[in-house]
Image: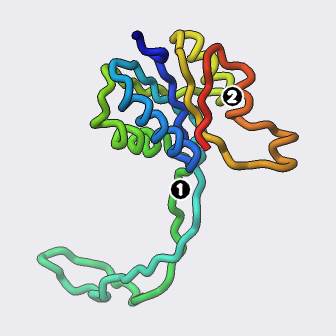
Amino acid sequence: MDNLFRRIILAYDGSEGGKKALQLTLGIVAQNTGMELTVVNVYDEKIGSKQMDSIHVEPPALNGYLLEGIQLPPLPIKQGFNEKTTHTIIKNSVDQILFEAKQALENSPFISVDYIILEGSPADAICELAEKFEADLIVAGSSGTGGLRRMFLGSVTGNIIKNAPCHVLVAK
């Protein structure tokens, strides 16, 4: 009997729901070898900055003495003063998310695993890719958000379910 699912798209974002979807996909593949898997992440990287205290220790002043033949001007003595520095913080790093997926999938029995970064609305981008690749299944995680937020904003997984050209499996 042929595999029901030959081409699977795993929507992976590094969240708890995404990790559950990854584990569910690994379970499906363990029972059905020869599948093609495409792991997709929709670009949602946010770059910010944060000021942090750093302790800077200046070398002691040499007050014009020669140091290995080089004349140095007098330097102020400022030992142990605090200074603010700015550090870049990347949230939802695509590289980190895909690295996690690659580590989890490196010993899986897939014939083919591809990793794709998409842009745009996550649900629309994933559904368009599923249609283009003629996917048989999309595996996605449940976000766990509910209440008014879900009612007004909807969820990515909910929109995938509504618009997908194939079966959708939701990991909870």
Q: Residue at x 59, y 11 (%)?
A: 131
Vertical placement of 46 versus 139: above or below?
below
Residue beneath label 2, please? 121
Tell which residue pokes out farthest to the front in this image: 1
Say left or right for 171 vs 102: right
The residue type indicated by label 1 comes to Ile
Tell which residue pokes out farthest to the left in this image: 68
Mark earlier in primary sequence (1, 2): 1
Q: Nearer the viewer, residue 122 or 78?
A: 122
Vertical placement of 2 versus 31: above or below?
above
Vertical placement of 123 versus 144: above or below?
above
Q: Residue at x 40, y 44 (%)?
A: 100
- For the N terminus, which image quadrant? top left
Q: Nearer the viewer, residue 67 or 20?
A: 20
Q: What is the crowding at mark 1: few (fewer than 14 residues within 10 Å), some, or many (at least 20)? A: few
The residue type indicated by label 2 comes to Ser
Q: Nearer the viewer, residue 145 or 99?
A: 145
Q: Position of residue 13 (x, y in %)?
A: 55, 40
Q: Position of residue 55 (x, y in %)?
A: 44, 81
Residue beneath label 1, please? 89
Q: What is the crowding at mark 2: few (fewer than 14 residues within 10 Å), some, or many (at least 20)? A: few
Residue 31: image quadrant is: top left
Q: Position of residue 137 (x, y in %)?
A: 55, 21
**Which numbered tag is attached to residue 50?**
none
* SS class, disc 2: loop
Residue 172: image quadrant is: top right
Q: Position of residue 15 (x, y in %)?
A: 56, 48
Say left or right for 58 vs 13: left
* SS class, disc 1: strand
Separation (CA) of disc 1 from disc 2:
23 Å
Q: Residue at x 55, y 32 (%)?
A: 11
